[in-house]
Image (tube, grey):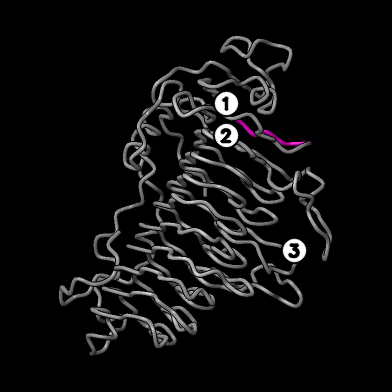
Amino acid sequence: MRRAARLWGAVLGTAMAAAGVIAAPGSASAATPTIVVAVNGDDAAPGTVTRPLRTIQAAVDKAKPGDVIAVRGGTYALDDNITIATSGTASQPISLGAYPGEWVVVDGERLPASHTPVGGSIPRAERGAIHQEASYWRISDLEIVNGPYGYYCDSCDNNVFARLVTHDNYESGFQLQGASSGNQILDLDSYGNRDPRKNGESADGLAIKEGSGTGNVVRGARLWNNVDDGFDAWKFASPVLVENTIAYGNGFNRWNFPDFAGDGNGFKLGGGSPAPAVAHTLRNTMAFRNAAKGVTDNGNPGALTLTRNTTFRNQGTGFDADVSGSRAVLSGNLSLSDQTPVALGTGTVSSGNSWDLGGTWNDASVLSTDTSALTAPRGSDGSLPSASAFLVPRNGTAIGARL
């Protein structure tokens, strides 16, 4: 799925404002491009509109705090991954995105790590068609395909990632890990990511895992048809907020991998041996038609907060919060036509959910089950398509998500 080109600067300003981010000098919403890249450019050029650079890496290497990198439309086939190692500042972030009104594809098919053999490992520096270890960046409006991970960010603070599309990568579409805090992942579309080297064990739509750091937010994402999970917070030791997000169709073996190992959860909110106790928050989300569970604590005994979420037609449990010692709080959630609505632990607090209210909750209980309402193209501002009737109870009960 390729979205129509958008007015880059104005839209990022809208997304940042919605997320509580104030546009800083040098951000896409406050400045004109200072470095320009084009497929017919020259890395010996100064990087102006009339004399653009040829590669995104050259622009990244040239950038300093406050710069705005605008990439002209076209496909940028990589021979080496794009590495972002220089940080901006709080008052002067560095911006990277598509030139206004144009569409950019970053293609990692030629990267050696994209073709790591079964049982092999990807060296840390080669993870990601775009590999970032830096802070205070504003990344927007890029389509990232066929990489060894799509976007990979390790030890990253205070970045905004807006309206990225990551699909058909050989590991997770977007992964944030390490000591990373204050990042905002907004309006991400991540789908069709697979993991042939592990027969589907670990390629998620979005993974925030194996690390820690407060203030990370996911908002407005769609995570679908990935080989493992939609969202995975495995071994991330600090709370993450996920809201206004959908995860569907994950965990099916569309690639005919032998010894298939995909998990197939919509939202996986923890994990590890032992799993750290973390108070992740999930609100106003939907998980439907996943191969396993809609939402799972995955062994996380922390004080999860699950509020006004909906699960629908998942092949496993809709809401799984039954780990020993669980301190999860579930309120106002709706399970429809899942294999099992809910699994609760002895310490879990459950109130005002569909299983607490009783009665029958199935396809006939809601105004619409037409999933196309949420899988249609996004709005011109990157917003989710309107789905005012999708999975909304016919009887008007104020439970479940509204997207």
Position of 64 with respect to 385 (left or right) is: right
Q: Residues within 10 Å of mark 1 (few under 14, many from 20)?
A: many
Q: In 3D space, how far apart are the residues under numbered discs 3 and 1 (Cα atoms)?
A: 31 Å
| Image quadrant assignment for residue 327 | bottom left
Residue position for label 2: 104
Q: Position of residue 305 (x, y in %)?
A: 36, 68
Counting residues from the start of the chain, the first of labels 2 and 3 encountered is: 2
Q: Which residues are magenta?
A: 74-79
Image location of residue 101, percent across then percent down: 45, 28
Name which residue lies at 64% across and 26% down. Answer: 60
Q: Residues within 10 Å of mark 3 (few under 14, many from 20)?
A: many
Q: Is residue 78 located in the magenta-colored stretch of the structure?
A: yes
Can residue 296 be seen here? The reply is no
- Residue at x-position 48% and y-position 76%: 301
**Which residue does the numbered mark 1 point to in the structure image?**
71
Which residue is disc 3 drawn over?
A: 196
Which amino acid, mark 3?
Answer: Pro
Separation of disc 2 and disc 3 at Cα?
A: 26 Å
For marks 3 and 1, the one nearer the N-term is: 1
